[in-house]
Image: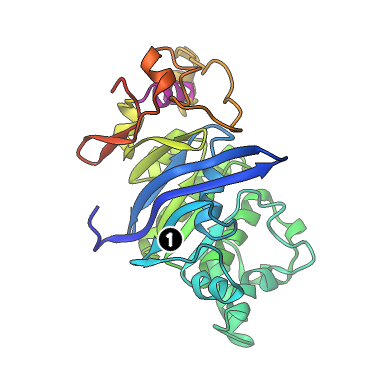
Amino acid sequence: MSEKTTLLETRNLTKHFVVGTNKVVHAVDDISLAIGENEIVGLVGESGSGKTTFGRTIMGLWGKTGGEVWYQGKKLPAKYSHADFNRYSREMQMIFQDPYSSLNPRMTVREIIGEGLKILGMERGKKVTDLVGEWLERVGLYPDHMNRYPHEFSGGQRQRIGIARALIVKPRFVVCDEPISALDVSVQAQVVNLLSDLRESMGLTLLLIAHDLSMVRYISDRMAVMYLGSMVELGPANAVYFQPRHPYTKLLVKSNPEPDPRKERHREHVGIEGEIPSPINLKPGCRFAGRCPSVEENCRNHTPPLREVAPGYFVACHLV
């Protein structure tokens, strides 16, 4: 991707957590990813693969252990000050996973959605109320909902409130952390279509973190696959979904439920044997070697780099 179109880029981004005296949790290791303007990049992987940590580290909610984050050609601070949060919150926002815990139960919807405008000094008074009403309509709710409290809404409605809260300040880049995982299947498609529509109308750039590969394939331009803190595959969403190259991605796609119940009933169910190893004090070698059906001796001893195997397509595997 050319530098002219790159909006946000991570360079060797690393986030480790120290537990005890000499134990290091490798939550995110050496990830480089460039995201273009008005692009949706889907980030998938099992629970514990580091997806949420990657998103929160980009946003500055957690300090970096190593590497850099660049936004519009400028390197962001290693640790954010209060002034940094105010400056970059106008440009970068996050939609959180759980619509039940991410909204303050003591605040009205008007206060929740309009809070960012006040904190950032963008609007005051009646203008805030007017904008909250406009955004409630934009996300499929009613302006007269603004005086209600979060407990009066369903999970899907709460997630729409969270979307309105993030987008009312008109950011350019948004991290969507599992925005539909806590919702009923019937509501998931509505939220996905809403995000797609808002991307088109606002020119948004999204990093979409999710478990559902079929949904990510549907909405994303590119798909990135994480395993145990590292990126193992990156390419056009359709190519990664329909013609995966890394052994982990192949198993991940096969284990993903088929949206069509008739196809799901007759397809072969393939699971990924074993569990993700502990991310503490990792040894050299491919991190998927212990669960890979095609593992070779070289895989256990040498860590495969993420390399370009086709134009715009990257895989971290000795066998590809």
Give the camera-side residue of 37 and 314.
Answer: 314
Residue sticking out furthest to the bottom: 125
x, y (%) of residue 149?
75, 64
x and y, in percent, of residue 160 in the image: 58, 57
Tell me the residue that label 1 is attached to.
198
Q: Is residue 249 magenta?
A: yes
Across and down, in percent, residue 78 comes to: 51, 62
Question: In the shown orientation, is residue 12 left or right of residue 182?
Answer: left
What residue is at 45 percent from the left and 50 percent from the top? 13
Image mark count:
1
Above or below: residue 310 compared with residue 105: above
Please, which residue is most extreme toward the front here?
22
Is 264 one of the magenta-colored residues? no
Q: Is residue 92 above or below residue 129?
A: above
Q: Amino acid at mark 1?
A: Leu
Instruction: Give left or right: position of 279 versus 90.
Output: right
Q: Is residue 262 above or below residue 221?
A: above
- Can residue 37 be seen in the rendering of this structure? no
Residue 24 place in picture, x, y as percent:
61, 39
Q: Residue at x 64, y 87 (%)?
A: 125
Placement of the C terminus among the 4 image quadrants: top left
Range drawn in magenta: 246-255
Q: Main secondary structure of the magenta part?
A: helix
Q: Is residue 93 visible?
A: yes
Residue at 71% from the left image edge and 51% from the top image edge? 100
Q: Relative to 182, say whether 109 is above or below.
A: below
- Element type where label 1 sits in the image: helix
* Image quadrant where residue 213 sits: top left
Q: Nearer the viewer, residue 195 or 274?
A: 274
Looking at this view, is 212 or 48 the one in front? 48
Extreme residue toward the right, this view:
106
- Residue found at x 39% / y 24%: 302
